[in-house]
Image (cartoon, rainbow, N blue to C red):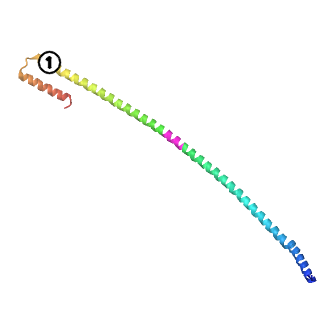
Amino acid sequence: MLKLDLNLLWTVVDVLILYVLLRKFLFKPIQNVLDQRQKMIEADIAAAQTSKTEAAAALTTAQDKLRNVDNEAAARREAYEKQAEVEKQQLLADAQKQADEIVAAGKAAVEIERQNKLREADAQATALARSMCEKLLKHNLTAQDDDQLLDDLLQKAGAGNGN
């Protein structure tokens, strides 16, 4: 059968004692350090995840604000463009009204001037006709007198027009 040697028994006991001592003084502290590191890593990962979530939320908020600012700017620009168009139309209408008034005033002045010239022409024609009638009635006219009166009449008519 097997024979147990006392040395073998002491070796086994020594190995067991060594195992217990190593476990208590070496393996447990190392395991504790490893556990602490694992907890720190998990905490850092959780903090990083939280920071990532907060950053994503902040980014979303910033993008929403930017979109709102863009929309507000577009709305303001559109309102300003509409206001500018209204003012442009008003200015054009005012300018057209002033132009129409100027044209109407010019036409009225031209019409008044035309009426004055017509009156002057009528007055001259009447005066010439009266003058001619007076001369005709004063003497009996010959063909030569008729030609002379016609020449005088034409000269007076030319002098009256400023020619």
Classified by dominant secondary structure, the portion drawn in magenta counts as helix
**In the picture shown, does residue 68 fall above or below 149?**
below
Q: Quadrant of residue 131?
A: top left
Give whichever of 47, 117 is nearer the camera: 47
Q: Left or right of 34: which side holds 85? A: left
| 7 falls in the magenta region | no
Instruction: Give the amino acid type for the residue marked by disc 1 in the picture.
Output: Cys
Position of residue 35 measured from the top left corner of the image (x, y, whole percent): 80, 66
Where is 24 relative to 158, above or below? below
Number of numbered callouts drawn: 1
Horizontal relation, residue 82 to residue 62: left or right: left
Considering the numbered disc 1 on the image, is that residue within a helix, a strand or a loop? helix
For the C terminus, the image quarter is top left
- Quadrant for the N terminus, please: bottom right
Residue at x-position 79% and y-position 68%: 34
User: Residue at position x 38%, y 32% from top?
Assistant: 100
Tell me residue 97's x, y (percent). 41, 32
Image quarter of residue 33: bottom right
Q: Residue furthest right?
A: 6
Q: Report which quarter residue 19 is drawn in.
A: bottom right
Q: Residue furthest top?
A: 137
Task: State the image coordinates of residue 10 (x, y, percent, origin top left).
Answer: 92, 81
Residue 63 x, y percent position in the rendering: 61, 51
Task: Name the foreground residue: 74 vs 25.
Answer: 25
Q: Which contiguous range is marked in magenta?
A: 76-84
Residue at 67% from the left image edge and 55% from the top image edge: 55
108 vs 66: above or below: above
Residue under numbered circle 1:
133
Q: Residue at x 12, y 24 (%)?
A: 150
Side of 26 relative to 146 (left or right): right
